[in-house]
Amino acid sequence: MKEMETGSHQSELDSEPQEIQTYHRCNIVAFLKRNTFVVLTVTAVASGIGLGFALRPINMSDSDIRYLMFPGELLMRILQMLMLPLIVSSLISGLSSVDRKAYGRIGLRAFCYYMLTTLIAAFTGIVLAVIIQPGNWSRNTSASSGGRAEAVQSVDAFLDLIRNMIPSNLVEACFRKFKTVYSRSVSTGISITEASVNNYTVPVPGSSDGINMLGLLVFSVAFGLILGSMGSQGKPLRDFFDCLNKAVMHLVNIFIWYSPVGILFLLAGQVVKMTDTVEIGREVAMYALTVIAGLLIHSFLTLPLIYFVVTWKNPFRFMSGVLQALATAFGTSSSSATLPVTLHCMEVNHSMDKRVTRFMLPTGATMNMDGAALYEAVAALFIAQIHHMNFGLGQIIVLSLIVTAASTGAAGIPQAGMVSMVIVLSSAGLPKEDISLLMMVDWILDRLRTTTNVLGDCIGVCVVQHLSKHELQSSRPAGEGLVEEILHL
């Protein structure tokens, strides 16, 4: 009898390790399924760098390098193809669905908070990039597709900004934007200089290739708001843009799986063209550190300061109550996927009003992109510094507005940084091929900026609720109906 008990106990001990192994194996498979795109991207980055270093001793010609980068060129063309319908449809669809009567002052305060924090984040990134100069740590950097920025006075750059906000032709705005050039003769219009402006040159109207994203954004915002105010008359057109947005999103979800292939060959070509790989690697590391420093400043200084000034409460005690949401954001790299956990933290841990949380958090998950704005501002100036292109005050103002609009409009897509970064580089007149250098560290920066985005959403709920407490108290009896309406939306 004892021998039988001993044998059965031994068999149970033998089966336990097998069950543990099976459990661990299932966990690994589940992790790979959840993070397939991240794994493929990191693998593509490592493979591209390895392939580039393996091909460097061959001394490939320029035409051979161009052939090598052809799959990457296809990726860039796909991203440029998708960015225009994506931005226009997402902005018109989102803004036309906003019911100003239902949300009133709460919605206005939320919108102002989103725009303010995104602009602050963009300027934080710009200031850090100008001070640290991550792209100028070496004077012998590669200038694979570089150039020099034309000299434009700050006043003319600012006026160009306003002109581009109101394009004279929407079709032309899809491929060309207004730009002031300088001529020695107004009558002949010849001898356009790229040097500094002197007493003999005068500004004349000109243009440059590239999408006038600012003008299209202004039109889309105005069109969406007008469409939302038309009620039932505008419903067919709202349904059209909503369907168009969903169709473009499906296209993005399909085409985005090609990006690891394109990144591999883009990186390989960049490594082959580098004159000094050590210096380029150092500059990319400095770029990553600059972005991380900006995210830390925004997360632990700017946002807590806004929270403290408005509510006069300890912001770090509040942040301890949303740690679960922040950890989920870092793990999933998606504000939308983190939304259920964020709602739980705000409504259970902090007892926030559901009328505010269920309006602001879904909106903020697709509109409030502080981390993305900061990242894109640093990235644009980093690429400009690599190619020794100096940005003036007017161009920096334009860049900050473009970054704010692009991070807001392209927020709901997977790996949004890649597509919105192409938008920013195209609008700022910077070479788009160098986006492959950014992808070397984007897999970790994407998680950090998503965490910053979620923290900004949470603090925004507290700020808006504190400022709207009188409206919330006065509408308390009808609160249940409003909650049901928001949930339905």
Image (tube, grey):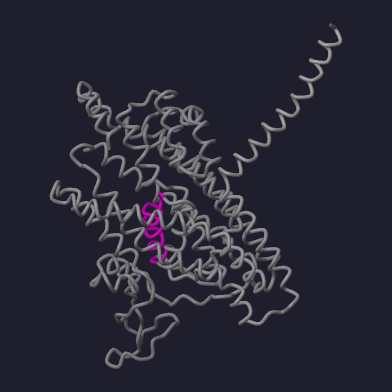
Query: Who is closer to the viewer here, 361 or 253?
Result: 253
Query: Who is closer to the viewer here, 443 or 15?
Result: 15
Q: Is residue 400 magenta?
A: yes
Residue at the (37%, 57%) spot, across then down: 248
The image shows residue 82, relative to residue 200, as above or below, that is above
Q: Is residue 484 left or right of residue 341?
A: left
- Extreme residue toward the bottom, this view: 188
Residue at the (63%, 64%) spot, across then down: 137
Q: Is residue 190 left or right of residue 269?
A: left
Quarter holding residue 434: bottom right
Number of numbered discs:
0
The image shows residue 117, relative to residue 312, as above or below, that is below
Q: Is residue 479 magenta?
A: no
Q: Is residue 258 left or right of residue 201?
A: right
Residue at the (30%, 44%) spot, across then down: 111
Identify the magenta region. Answer: 394-412
Quarter holding residue 139: bottom right
Question: What kind of secondary structure does the magenta stretch mostly adopt?
Answer: helix
Q: Quadrant of the N terminus?
A: top right
Residue at the (24%, 51%) spot, across then down: 239
